[in-house]
Amino acid sequence: MTTAVTSPTYGGTGGRTAVAARARQVVKAYGTGETRVVALDQVDVDIAQGEFTAIMGPSGSGKSTLMHCLAGLDTVTGGQIFLADTEITGLKDKKLTQLRRDRVGFIFQAFNLLPTLNALENITLPMDIAGRRPDAGWLARVVETVGLSERLKHRPGQLSGGQQQRVAVARALAARPEIIFGDEPTGNLDSRAGAEILGFLRRSVDELGQTIVMVTHDPVAASYADRVLYLADGRIVDEMTRPTAEAVLDRMKDFDARGRTS
Ligand SMILES: Nc1ncnc2c1ncn2[C@@H]1O[C@H](COP(=O)(O)OP(=O)(O)OP(=O)(O)O)[C@@H](O)[C@H]1O
């Protein structure tokens, strides 16, 4: 049987749905000799297409590293990463940059908007740079989904933090990427603005068919996802489907307690 090699213990999709991104036996080590840190330790994971996946785990467990490796923002030390059927490990810089530009969207904790451009210009900037024409119908739908129709001519400085992050969400959605990665996208927002953004991300999965992977420390944020993957010491140690904030919190307490006794 060879299936054990290709089916992750946790983090598989059980063949139920198409896979948007895949990691196989991924190792990421930083430094050498005594300062060597293994951030990812033979990680196998399948990210299901059209689903919202949250990645959780203690500080230093490898969440951002896993996201960066899946997104082609960082190279791996060993193993393979696939975006749909394309293996991205081993791609040359230029090809990788092109692939990220054409197929991947990002939302970071810092909104990363250009202050001199208005909201609409910020949303279409990546496509402008790539020389691609936004699909007007799609753009209107995205803008409507994230509730920005009345704010398109405002510059970032004239928008609240929550509205700025909505612009960043719309920017990620506008190019219709195959997959969007978010690193604590609501980390800088108060809980009301955070809930709004998470609601928009949820809607983009339910109504626009988007695939989203989000790193978070927040059980409430994780409860918007379809599935939560738990990392510890660079390994995926557990998963939860249809999470509630209470269940996620309980699981985290469980891990903490185990961590203290081991
Ligand atoms: N550029 C780097 N150089 C050396 N070590 C690094 C580097 N980036 C990350 N690490 C180490 O790799 C491990 C995983 O880091 P990572 O940032 O992925 O964790 P995380 O789970 O996202 O943490 P946090 O929740 O605190 O953001 C940590 O031990 C970290 O110190």
Image (cartoon, rainbow, N blue to C red):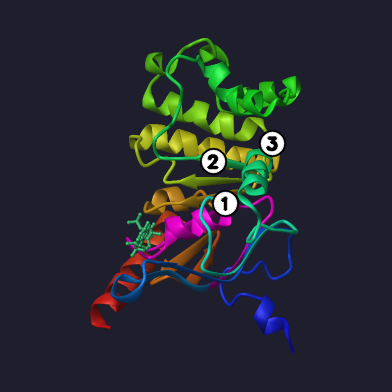
x and y, in percent, of residue 11 in the image: 58, 68
Between 183 and 128, the one nearer to me in the picture: 128
Residue at 69 percent of width and 53 percent of height: 49
Name the spot of residue 28 as percent of width and height, x first: 47, 67
Q: Quadrant of the C terminus?
A: bottom left
Q: Which residue is mark 1?
A: 71
Query: Which mark is drawn over residue 176?
Result: 3
Instruction: Report x, y in % for residue 2.
Output: 73, 85
Where residue 231 sits, quadrant-wise, is bottom left
Quadrant into which the N terminus falls:
bottom right
Stretch of the chain drawn in magenta: 43-72
User: Residue 64 or 9: which is nearer the viewer?
Assistant: 64
Q: Secondary structure at mark 3?
A: loop
Residue drawn at x 38%, y 26% as measured from the top left: 161
2 or 1: tag closer to the N-terminus: 1
CA gap, disc 1 and disc 3? 15 Å
